[in-house]
Amino acid sequence: MSDARVGSGPAGPGRPPTAATILHADLDAFYASVEQRDDPDLRGRPVLVGGGVVLACSYEAKRAGVRTAMNGRQARALCPDAIVVPPRMEAYSAASKDVFAIFRDTTPLVEGISVDEAFLEVGGLARLVGTPRDIAARLRGRVLAEVGLPITVGVARTKFLAKVASGVAKPDGLLVVEPDAEREFLHPLRVERLWGVGKVTAAKLHGLGVHTVADVAALGESALVSLLGPASGHHLHALATFSDPRRVTPGVSRRSIGSQRALGNRRRSPEELDTILAGIVDRLARRLREGDRTCRTVVLRLRFGDFTRVTRSHTLRTATDRTAALDAAARELLTESMSMILQRGITLIGLSLANLDRDGREQLELALDERDEPHTALAGPGPERDPAALDSALDAVRARFGAAAVGRATQLGRDPGISVPVLPEHE
Protein backbone atom coordinates (compact mmCIF):
# COMPACT_ATOMS: atom_id res chain seq x y z
CA MET A 1 0.00 0.00 0.00
CA SER A 2 1.43 3.39 -0.96
CA ASP A 3 0.47 6.96 -0.15
CA ALA A 4 2.10 9.93 -1.85
CA ARG A 5 1.66 13.59 -2.60
CA VAL A 6 3.17 15.65 -5.39
CA GLY A 7 3.45 19.34 -4.47
CA SER A 8 1.68 21.30 -1.80
CA GLY A 9 0.22 24.71 -1.19
CA PRO A 10 -1.75 27.01 -3.46
CA ALA A 11 -1.77 27.09 -7.21
CA GLY A 12 1.36 28.48 -8.83
CA PRO A 13 1.67 31.52 -11.11
CA GLY A 14 -0.58 31.32 -14.15
CA ARG A 15 -2.49 28.38 -12.73
CA PRO A 16 -6.20 28.74 -11.96
CA PRO A 17 -6.69 28.96 -8.19
CA THR A 18 -8.53 25.68 -7.93
CA ALA A 19 -7.67 22.76 -5.70
CA ALA A 20 -7.13 19.08 -6.37
CA THR A 21 -10.67 17.91 -5.62
CA ILE A 22 -11.33 15.24 -8.27
CA LEU A 23 -10.75 11.61 -7.30
CA HIS A 24 -10.23 8.80 -9.78
CA ALA A 25 -10.91 5.56 -7.93
CA ASP A 26 -9.86 2.39 -9.73
CA LEU A 27 -10.09 -1.15 -8.36
CA ASP A 28 -6.87 -3.12 -8.77
CA ALA A 29 -6.97 -6.12 -11.15
CA PHE A 30 -10.68 -6.23 -10.41
CA TYR A 31 -11.83 -9.68 -11.56
CA ALA A 32 -8.65 -11.37 -10.29
CA SER A 33 -8.88 -9.52 -6.97
CA VAL A 34 -12.44 -10.78 -6.46
CA GLU A 35 -11.21 -14.34 -7.08
CA GLN A 36 -8.37 -13.89 -4.59
CA ARG A 37 -10.74 -12.38 -2.06
CA ASP A 38 -13.16 -15.30 -2.31
CA ASP A 39 -10.53 -18.06 -2.36
CA PRO A 40 -7.71 -17.61 0.19
CA ASP A 41 -5.62 -20.24 -1.63
CA LEU A 42 -5.27 -17.82 -4.56
CA ARG A 43 -3.88 -14.91 -2.55
CA GLY A 44 -0.35 -13.97 -3.47
CA ARG A 45 -0.38 -16.32 -6.46
CA PRO A 46 -0.62 -15.57 -10.21
CA VAL A 47 -4.26 -15.82 -11.27
CA LEU A 48 -5.72 -15.74 -14.77
CA VAL A 49 -9.45 -15.23 -15.21
CA GLY A 50 -10.56 -16.98 -18.39
CA GLY A 51 -8.68 -19.71 -20.23
CA GLY A 52 -8.98 -19.09 -23.96
CA VAL A 53 -8.56 -15.33 -23.61
CA VAL A 54 -7.29 -13.66 -20.43
CA LEU A 55 -10.16 -11.48 -19.21
CA ALA A 56 -8.13 -10.35 -16.18
CA CYS A 57 -4.96 -11.27 -14.35
CA SER A 58 -3.54 -10.63 -10.91
CA TYR A 59 -0.51 -8.44 -10.36
CA GLU A 60 1.53 -11.57 -9.68
CA ALA A 61 0.76 -12.67 -13.24
CA LYS A 62 1.30 -9.19 -14.64
CA ARG A 63 4.84 -9.19 -13.28
CA ALA A 64 5.49 -12.21 -15.50
CA GLY A 65 4.37 -10.27 -18.56
CA VAL A 66 0.74 -11.41 -18.77
CA ARG A 67 -1.77 -8.81 -19.95
CA THR A 68 -5.54 -8.61 -20.26
CA ALA A 69 -6.89 -9.87 -23.63
CA MET A 70 -3.80 -12.00 -24.17
CA ASN A 71 -4.14 -15.45 -25.69
CA GLY A 72 -4.45 -17.97 -22.88
CA ARG A 73 -1.76 -20.26 -24.27
CA GLN A 74 0.69 -17.37 -24.55
CA ALA A 75 -0.15 -16.25 -21.01
CA ARG A 76 0.51 -19.71 -19.57
CA ALA A 77 3.83 -19.88 -21.44
CA LEU A 78 4.89 -16.60 -19.81
CA CYS A 79 3.60 -17.67 -16.40
CA PRO A 80 3.62 -21.51 -16.08
CA ASP A 81 2.60 -21.33 -12.41
CA ALA A 82 -0.55 -19.34 -13.18
CA ILE A 83 -3.84 -20.64 -11.83
CA VAL A 84 -6.65 -20.37 -14.37
CA VAL A 85 -10.15 -19.79 -13.02
CA PRO A 86 -13.43 -19.44 -14.94
CA PRO A 87 -15.04 -16.00 -14.82
CA ARG A 88 -17.90 -15.40 -12.40
CA MET A 89 -19.67 -12.34 -13.76
CA GLU A 90 -22.36 -12.35 -11.08
CA ALA A 91 -19.70 -12.10 -8.36
CA TYR A 92 -17.95 -9.23 -10.15
CA SER A 93 -21.21 -7.37 -10.70
CA ALA A 94 -22.15 -7.75 -7.02
CA ALA A 95 -18.73 -6.50 -5.90
CA SER A 96 -18.97 -3.55 -8.28
CA LYS A 97 -22.36 -2.54 -6.92
CA ASP A 98 -21.03 -2.70 -3.35
CA VAL A 99 -18.09 -0.47 -4.24
CA PHE A 100 -20.27 2.04 -6.09
CA ALA A 101 -22.54 2.21 -3.05
CA ILE A 102 -19.50 3.37 -1.05
CA PHE A 103 -18.66 5.90 -3.75
CA ARG A 104 -22.16 7.38 -3.58
CA ASP A 105 -22.09 7.35 0.22
CA THR A 106 -18.89 9.40 0.01
CA THR A 107 -20.24 12.08 -2.36
CA PRO A 108 -23.32 12.51 -4.56
CA LEU A 109 -21.06 13.59 -7.42
CA VAL A 110 -20.01 10.21 -8.83
CA GLU A 111 -19.42 9.53 -12.52
CA GLY A 112 -18.96 5.84 -13.26
CA ILE A 113 -16.85 5.03 -16.30
CA SER A 114 -16.62 1.24 -16.02
CA VAL A 115 -17.47 -1.56 -13.60
CA ASP A 116 -14.31 -0.90 -11.60
CA GLU A 117 -13.59 2.83 -11.80
CA ALA A 118 -15.24 6.19 -11.29
CA PHE A 119 -14.58 9.89 -10.87
CA LEU A 120 -15.71 11.57 -7.66
CA GLU A 121 -15.89 15.32 -6.98
CA VAL A 122 -15.28 16.09 -3.29
CA GLY A 123 -14.54 19.83 -3.35
CA GLY A 124 -17.66 20.73 -1.40
CA LEU A 125 -16.97 18.34 1.47
CA ALA A 126 -13.91 19.99 3.09
CA ARG A 127 -15.77 21.56 6.02
CA LEU A 128 -17.73 18.40 6.68
CA VAL A 129 -15.27 15.54 6.34
CA GLY A 130 -11.80 16.88 5.61
CA THR A 131 -9.41 17.37 2.71
CA PRO A 132 -9.63 15.43 -0.58
CA ARG A 133 -6.64 13.40 0.53
CA ASP A 134 -8.41 12.49 3.79
CA ILE A 135 -11.55 11.56 1.87
CA ALA A 136 -9.57 9.40 -0.57
CA ALA A 137 -7.78 7.60 2.26
CA ARG A 138 -11.06 6.97 4.05
CA LEU A 139 -12.68 5.67 0.86
CA ARG A 140 -9.83 3.23 0.28
CA GLY A 141 -10.15 1.98 3.83
CA ARG A 142 -13.88 1.43 3.48
CA VAL A 143 -13.60 -0.46 0.19
CA LEU A 144 -11.00 -2.77 1.71
CA ALA A 145 -12.87 -3.28 4.99
CA GLU A 146 -16.42 -3.56 3.61
CA VAL A 147 -15.88 -5.18 0.21
CA GLY A 148 -12.49 -6.80 0.73
CA LEU A 149 -10.85 -5.33 -2.36
CA PRO A 150 -7.80 -3.11 -2.88
CA ILE A 151 -8.40 0.17 -4.69
CA THR A 152 -6.10 2.90 -5.95
CA VAL A 153 -7.08 6.56 -5.90
CA GLY A 154 -5.56 9.48 -7.77
CA VAL A 155 -6.45 13.01 -6.69
CA ALA A 156 -5.93 16.06 -8.90
CA ARG A 157 -7.43 19.28 -10.25
CA THR A 158 -8.66 17.67 -13.51
CA LYS A 159 -10.11 14.36 -14.56
CA PHE A 160 -7.16 13.55 -16.80
CA LEU A 161 -4.54 14.20 -14.13
CA ALA A 162 -6.53 12.25 -11.53
CA LYS A 163 -6.69 9.23 -13.83
CA VAL A 164 -2.98 9.43 -14.63
CA ALA A 165 -2.23 9.75 -10.91
CA SER A 166 -4.16 6.58 -10.12
CA GLY A 167 -2.31 4.76 -12.90
CA VAL A 168 1.06 5.84 -11.52
CA ALA A 169 0.04 4.92 -7.94
CA LYS A 170 -1.08 1.35 -8.79
CA PRO A 171 -1.39 -1.09 -7.21
CA ASP A 172 -3.12 -0.30 -3.93
CA GLY A 173 -1.93 3.29 -3.72
CA LEU A 174 -2.98 6.87 -3.18
CA LEU A 175 -1.37 9.79 -5.03
CA VAL A 176 -2.34 13.45 -4.71
CA VAL A 177 -1.14 15.85 -7.42
CA GLU A 178 -1.36 19.41 -6.13
CA PRO A 179 -2.01 22.19 -8.67
CA ASP A 180 1.46 23.72 -8.19
CA ALA A 181 3.15 20.41 -9.04
CA GLU A 182 1.28 19.36 -12.18
CA ARG A 183 4.25 20.07 -14.47
CA GLU A 184 6.64 18.23 -12.16
CA PHE A 185 4.33 15.21 -12.15
CA LEU A 186 3.11 15.00 -15.73
CA HIS A 187 5.90 16.16 -18.02
CA PRO A 188 8.45 13.41 -17.24
CA LEU A 189 5.90 10.66 -18.06
CA ARG A 190 5.96 8.83 -21.38
CA VAL A 191 3.61 9.96 -24.15
CA GLU A 192 1.65 6.72 -23.80
CA ARG A 193 0.16 8.16 -20.58
CA LEU A 194 -1.82 10.69 -22.63
CA TRP A 195 -5.40 9.71 -23.46
CA GLY A 196 -5.65 8.90 -27.13
CA VAL A 197 -2.04 7.83 -27.62
CA GLY A 198 -2.10 4.23 -28.81
CA LYS A 199 0.53 2.25 -30.67
CA VAL A 200 0.09 4.08 -34.00
CA THR A 201 0.17 7.59 -32.53
CA ALA A 202 3.04 6.68 -30.21
CA ALA A 203 5.07 5.39 -33.17
CA LYS A 204 4.52 8.67 -35.06
CA LEU A 205 5.61 10.71 -32.06
CA HIS A 206 8.61 8.50 -31.33
CA GLY A 207 9.66 8.89 -34.95
CA LEU A 208 10.02 12.62 -34.29
CA GLY A 209 11.96 12.04 -31.10
CA VAL A 210 8.92 12.78 -28.93
CA HIS A 211 8.99 10.38 -26.00
CA THR A 212 7.69 12.28 -22.97
CA VAL A 213 4.74 14.53 -22.25
CA ALA A 214 7.22 17.41 -21.96
CA ASP A 215 8.29 16.67 -25.54
CA VAL A 216 4.65 16.86 -26.66
CA ALA A 217 4.18 20.24 -24.98
CA ALA A 218 7.41 21.53 -26.51
CA LEU A 219 6.43 20.37 -29.99
CA GLY A 220 3.63 22.92 -30.06
CA GLU A 221 -0.01 22.79 -31.05
CA SER A 222 0.45 23.60 -34.76
CA ALA A 223 3.03 20.86 -35.22
CA LEU A 224 0.78 18.33 -33.46
CA VAL A 225 -2.18 19.30 -35.64
CA SER A 226 -0.02 18.95 -38.76
CA LEU A 227 1.20 15.52 -37.67
CA LEU A 228 -1.96 14.00 -36.17
CA GLY A 229 -4.84 16.05 -37.58
CA PRO A 230 -6.94 18.76 -35.91
CA ALA A 231 -8.86 16.61 -33.42
CA SER A 232 -5.92 14.61 -32.04
CA GLY A 233 -3.49 17.51 -32.27
CA HIS A 234 -5.62 19.94 -30.27
CA HIS A 235 -6.55 17.17 -27.80
CA LEU A 236 -2.99 16.10 -27.00
CA HIS A 237 -1.73 19.67 -26.75
CA ALA A 238 -4.49 20.47 -24.27
CA LEU A 239 -3.64 17.48 -22.08
CA ALA A 240 0.10 18.16 -22.20
CA THR A 241 -0.52 21.73 -21.08
CA PHE A 242 -2.86 20.78 -18.22
CA SER A 243 -6.09 21.88 -19.90
CA ASP A 244 -9.05 19.60 -19.18
CA PRO A 245 -12.24 21.57 -18.43
CA ARG A 246 -14.51 18.52 -18.05
CA ARG A 247 -16.20 18.24 -14.70
CA VAL A 248 -17.54 15.21 -12.88
CA THR A 249 -21.06 14.75 -14.24
CA PRO A 250 -23.24 12.22 -12.40
CA GLY A 251 -26.54 11.10 -13.79
CA VAL A 252 -25.78 12.09 -17.37
CA SER A 253 -28.21 10.46 -19.78
CA ARG A 254 -26.20 7.84 -21.62
CA ARG A 255 -25.89 8.19 -25.37
CA SER A 256 -25.23 4.50 -25.89
CA ILE A 257 -25.63 1.09 -24.29
CA GLY A 258 -23.71 -2.03 -25.15
CA SER A 259 -22.87 -5.61 -24.40
CA GLN A 260 -20.04 -7.88 -25.43
CA ARG A 261 -19.13 -11.56 -25.32
CA ALA A 262 -15.67 -13.08 -24.97
CA LEU A 263 -15.57 -16.15 -27.20
CA GLY A 264 -12.26 -17.87 -26.42
CA ASN A 265 -10.00 -19.16 -29.18
CA ARG A 266 -11.95 -21.95 -30.79
CA ARG A 267 -13.34 -21.44 -34.27
CA ARG A 268 -16.92 -20.20 -34.44
CA SER A 269 -19.19 -20.93 -37.38
CA PRO A 270 -21.23 -18.13 -38.97
CA GLU A 271 -24.34 -19.78 -37.52
CA GLU A 272 -22.90 -19.70 -34.00
CA LEU A 273 -21.93 -16.05 -34.30
CA ASP A 274 -25.36 -15.18 -35.66
CA THR A 275 -26.98 -16.88 -32.67
CA ILE A 276 -24.71 -15.12 -30.16
CA LEU A 277 -25.35 -11.77 -31.79
CA ALA A 278 -29.10 -12.37 -31.76
CA GLY A 279 -28.95 -12.98 -28.01
CA ILE A 280 -27.10 -9.69 -27.50
CA VAL A 281 -29.68 -7.86 -29.61
CA ASP A 282 -32.55 -9.35 -27.60
CA ARG A 283 -31.02 -8.16 -24.36
CA LEU A 284 -30.13 -4.66 -25.53
CA ALA A 285 -33.50 -4.11 -27.21
CA ARG A 286 -35.27 -5.06 -24.00
CA ARG A 287 -33.09 -2.59 -22.06
CA LEU A 288 -34.04 0.13 -24.54
CA ARG A 289 -37.71 -0.47 -23.97
CA GLU A 290 -37.33 -0.72 -20.20
CA GLY A 291 -35.74 2.72 -20.23
CA ASP A 292 -38.26 4.18 -22.69
CA ARG A 293 -35.40 4.87 -25.08
CA THR A 294 -34.89 4.52 -28.81
CA CYS A 295 -31.69 4.34 -30.83
CA ARG A 296 -30.61 5.28 -34.33
CA THR A 297 -27.12 3.76 -34.66
CA VAL A 298 -26.10 0.12 -34.37
CA VAL A 299 -22.38 -0.48 -33.80
CA LEU A 300 -20.70 -3.89 -34.15
CA ARG A 301 -17.32 -4.38 -32.45
CA LEU A 302 -15.07 -7.36 -33.17
CA ARG A 303 -11.73 -8.53 -31.79
CA PHE A 304 -9.85 -11.04 -33.91
CA GLY A 305 -7.49 -13.86 -33.05
CA ASP A 306 -4.48 -11.66 -33.87
CA PHE A 307 -5.75 -9.07 -31.29
CA THR A 308 -6.65 -6.51 -33.94
CA ARG A 309 -10.05 -4.87 -33.68
CA VAL A 310 -12.62 -3.50 -36.08
CA THR A 311 -15.78 -1.44 -35.66
CA ARG A 312 -18.68 -1.32 -38.10
CA SER A 313 -21.81 0.85 -37.74
CA HIS A 314 -25.12 1.57 -39.43
CA THR A 315 -27.40 4.52 -38.74
CA LEU A 316 -31.10 3.85 -39.21
CA ARG A 317 -33.38 6.30 -41.01
CA THR A 318 -35.59 6.55 -37.93
CA ALA A 319 -35.01 5.80 -34.26
CA THR A 320 -36.45 2.52 -32.97
CA ASP A 321 -36.61 0.16 -30.03
CA ARG A 322 -37.89 -2.78 -32.09
CA THR A 323 -35.90 -5.99 -31.86
CA ALA A 324 -36.48 -6.96 -35.49
CA ALA A 325 -35.06 -3.72 -36.89
CA LEU A 326 -32.00 -3.81 -34.63
CA ASP A 327 -31.47 -7.50 -35.35
CA ALA A 328 -31.55 -6.92 -39.11
CA ALA A 329 -29.01 -4.11 -38.90
CA ALA A 330 -26.68 -6.07 -36.60
CA ARG A 331 -26.81 -9.18 -38.77
CA GLU A 332 -26.00 -7.23 -41.92
CA LEU A 333 -22.96 -5.69 -40.21
CA LEU A 334 -21.87 -9.18 -39.14
CA THR A 335 -22.31 -10.51 -42.67
CA GLU A 336 -20.19 -7.66 -44.03
CA SER A 337 -17.41 -8.61 -41.58
CA MET A 338 -17.59 -12.37 -42.03
CA SER A 339 -14.67 -12.68 -44.47
CA MET A 340 -12.33 -11.04 -41.93
CA ILE A 341 -13.66 -13.27 -39.18
CA LEU A 342 -13.06 -16.45 -41.19
CA GLN A 343 -9.53 -15.34 -42.07
CA ARG A 344 -8.40 -14.15 -38.64
CA GLY A 345 -10.62 -15.96 -36.16
CA ILE A 346 -12.62 -14.11 -33.54
CA THR A 347 -12.24 -13.80 -29.77
CA LEU A 348 -14.83 -11.15 -28.89
CA ILE A 349 -18.05 -9.80 -30.35
CA GLY A 350 -19.83 -6.74 -29.04
CA LEU A 351 -22.77 -4.57 -29.97
CA SER A 352 -23.62 -1.00 -29.01
CA LEU A 353 -26.79 0.96 -29.59
CA ALA A 354 -25.94 4.63 -29.95
CA ASN A 355 -27.62 7.98 -30.57
CA LEU A 356 -30.17 7.21 -27.87
CA ASP A 357 -33.19 9.40 -27.29
CA ARG A 358 -36.38 9.30 -25.30
CA ASP A 359 -39.13 7.20 -26.87
CA GLY A 360 -41.62 9.27 -28.80
CA ARG A 361 -39.39 12.24 -29.63
CA GLU A 362 -38.58 11.15 -33.17
CA GLN A 363 -40.55 12.07 -36.28
CA LEU A 364 -42.08 8.91 -37.67
CA GLU A 365 -41.41 7.94 -41.29
CA LEU A 366 -42.32 5.13 -43.63
CA ALA A 367 -39.58 2.51 -43.52
CA LEU A 368 -37.94 2.22 -46.93
CA ASP A 369 -34.91 0.22 -45.79
CA GLU A 370 -35.56 -3.23 -44.33
CA ARG A 371 -33.08 -2.45 -41.57
CA ASP A 372 -35.32 0.47 -40.61
CA GLU A 373 -38.24 -1.63 -39.30
CA PRO A 374 -38.44 -4.31 -42.01
CA HIS A 375 -41.87 -4.75 -43.62
CA THR A 376 -43.73 -3.18 -40.70
CA ALA A 377 -44.58 0.34 -41.83
CA LEU A 378 -47.79 -0.83 -43.51
CA ALA A 379 -48.47 -3.87 -41.32
CA GLY A 380 -51.80 -4.23 -39.63
CA PRO A 381 -52.47 -4.92 -35.95
CA GLY A 382 -51.89 -8.18 -34.17
CA PRO A 383 -48.76 -9.79 -32.74
CA GLU A 384 -48.32 -11.96 -35.82
CA ARG A 385 -47.75 -8.79 -37.91
CA ASP A 386 -46.85 -6.20 -35.29
CA PRO A 387 -43.26 -6.34 -33.95
CA ALA A 388 -44.20 -3.98 -31.11
CA ALA A 389 -46.86 -6.39 -29.85
CA LEU A 390 -44.47 -9.33 -30.07
CA ASP A 391 -41.73 -7.44 -28.22
CA SER A 392 -44.18 -6.40 -25.52
CA ALA A 393 -45.41 -9.97 -25.06
CA LEU A 394 -41.86 -11.34 -24.75
CA ASP A 395 -40.89 -8.53 -22.35
CA ALA A 396 -43.86 -9.39 -20.15
CA VAL A 397 -42.92 -13.08 -20.02
CA ARG A 398 -39.31 -12.29 -19.12
CA ALA A 399 -40.34 -9.74 -16.52
CA ARG A 400 -42.55 -12.29 -14.77
CA PHE A 401 -40.52 -15.49 -15.15
CA GLY A 402 -36.94 -14.29 -15.68
CA ALA A 403 -34.77 -13.40 -18.66
CA ALA A 404 -34.13 -17.06 -19.51
CA ALA A 405 -37.81 -17.98 -19.57
CA VAL A 406 -38.12 -17.52 -23.32
CA GLY A 407 -35.53 -17.40 -26.08
CA ARG A 408 -34.85 -18.21 -29.68
CA ALA A 409 -34.85 -21.86 -30.78
CA THR A 410 -31.45 -21.34 -32.43
CA GLN A 411 -29.95 -20.60 -29.00
CA LEU A 412 -30.77 -24.01 -27.53
CA GLY A 413 -27.57 -25.90 -26.71
CA ARG A 414 -25.35 -23.10 -28.00
CA ASP A 415 -22.41 -21.56 -26.12
CA PRO A 416 -23.39 -17.88 -25.70
CA GLY A 417 -19.85 -16.75 -24.82
CA ILE A 418 -18.92 -14.92 -21.63
CA SER A 419 -20.74 -11.69 -20.87
CA VAL A 420 -18.46 -8.80 -19.95
CA PRO A 421 -20.34 -5.92 -18.25
CA VAL A 422 -19.58 -2.24 -18.76
CA LEU A 423 -21.12 -0.46 -15.77
CA PRO A 424 -22.70 -1.83 -12.58
CA GLU A 425 -26.21 -0.98 -13.68
CA HIS A 426 -25.65 -2.65 -17.04
CA GLU A 427 -25.81 -6.33 -17.94
Image (cartoon, helix red, strand yellow):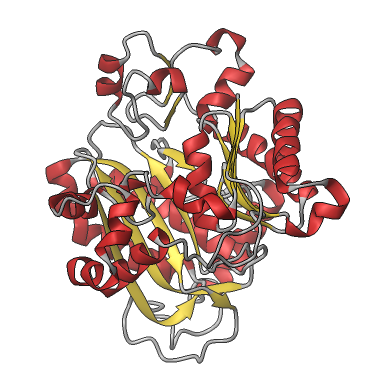
Q: Nearer the viewer, residue 211 or 37?
A: 211
Question: Do we see residue 422 in this rendering?
Answer: no
Query: Where is residue 344 drawn, in percent x and y?
Result: 15, 42
The x and y percentages for residue 12 are: 57, 59
From the viewer's side, name the closer residue of 147 and 282: 147
Vertical side of 241 occupied by 102: above or below: above
Q: Which residue is painted at 35% across and 30% down in the image?
A: 67
Residue 149 position by quadrant: top right
| Residue 57 seen in the figure | yes
Q: Position of residue 143 (x, y in %)?
A: 71, 33
Q: Quadrant of residue 411?
A: top left
Q: Is residue 24 above or below residue 322?
A: above
Residue that extends furthest to the front in the rendered view of this protein: 13
For the N terminus, which image quadrant? top right
| Residue sitting at x 22%, y 35% | 267
Which of 250/85 is in front?
250
Left or right position of 423 against 226: right
State the residue in front, 60 or 273: 60
Left or right: 35 with respect to 296? right
Residue 46, image quadrant: top left
Residue drawn at the location 35% of the way across and 76% of the way down: 315
Residue 419 higher or lower than 293, as above or below: above
Residue at left offset 61%, top offset 33%:
151
Total number of numbered discs in the rendering = 0
Q: Position of residue 275 (x, y in %)?
A: 36, 48
